Image (cartoon, rainbow, N blue to C red):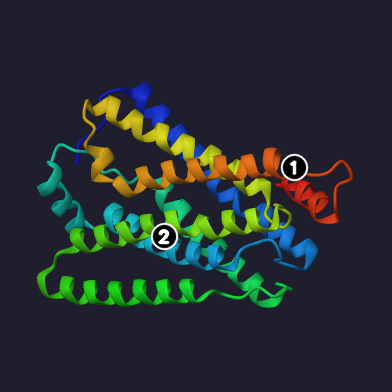
Amino acid sequence: MASWHSVPIHVAYEVLGWSAFFSWSISFYPQVILNYRRKSVVGLNIDYAVLDMVKEILYMIYSASLYYSPAVQKQYGNKYGQTQMNPVALNDIAFAAHAVLLSSFLVYQISIYDRGNQKLSKMAIGLTTIVFLTSTVCVCISLSHHHWLWLISIFNVIQVALTIIKYIPQAAMNFMRKSTEGWSIGLVLLDFFGGVTNFLQMIMQSVDQGSWKNFYGNIGKLLVAVVSILFDIIFICQHYCLYPPKDNMSKDQQLSENAMNEV
């Protein structure tokens, strides 16, 4: 793998990367705290939470494999050029591991707190089953041919697709309820900042290397950032423009703000 040409750009790359890590990592906590205080997950879409957990597991496998496995790195170099830098940074690994833990804990909260009449949809169950079966088949194929880069690339494509899909149920539920109560705006704002800094980090690497191969060499990271930013803008518009909190805030809204302040 290639090395850095500019120290200042390298420093900016690391700062942006760890800024994205802290922002994205902290973004889980406002929702967790809000659920704990309310002893309820009403307002949080269950499909979103489950699909997000599956997505984070696949992203962790992809990132860890590309960062730590010499075999995967060799195959990446053969495909994109041995002079190209590894598109996965240490902060990506740290975020992925943390995201798996927190997204799993969020699903656990759903299992123990009041969720009203909401349950996991058939769509989410079917989609999760398809992901599991597809992943199993791809693993079997890779074991016989040692196509490890191909395997994690499939995982990467799946997790990007899940990133796009997972936000839709939450946005749709907010629209149908005409409210964002129970859905933490703190999560959204931190997720938005993480997406922006993550995107800028990739630009820093491309500028230093004089090549944009790291964008399509790690298309998953790019699309996750872009999709997150777009949906966060939708959620921000829903919360502040379409369904703004009333002058006399409800108990749920007060708890949401307090959770954000604590984080």
Q: Position of residue 142 (x, y in %)?
A: 17, 70
Q: Position of residue 78 (x, y in %)?
A: 10, 48
Is residue 98 visible in the rendered image? The answer is: no
Alpha-carbon neighbours of circle 1 within 10 Å: few (<14), some, or many (≥20)?
Answer: some
Please indicate whether residue 137 sits to the left or right of residue 12 in the image: left
Quadrant of residue 183 within the rendered picture:
bottom right
For discs 2 and 1, the disc positioned in front in the rendered view: 1
Q: Which residue is mark 2?
A: 162
Q: Amino acid at mark 2?
A: Leu
Quadrant of residue 14 within the rendered picture:
top left
Residue 49 vertical position relative to residue 63 in the rendered view, above or below: below
Camera-side residue of 232 and 104: 232
Q: Residue at x 49, y 41 (%)?
A: 230
Residue 87 vertical position relative to residue 39 in the rendered view, above or below: above
Secondary element at tag 1: loop
Please indicate whether residue 237 sits to the left or right of residue 18 in the image: right
Give whichever of discs 2 and 1 has the lower sequence position: 2
Q: Position of residue 262 (x, y in %)?
A: 75, 47
Residue 55 vertical position relative to residue 89 in the rendered view, above or below: below
Please indicate whether residue 101 sits to the left or right of residue 93 in the image: right
Residue 244 image label: 1
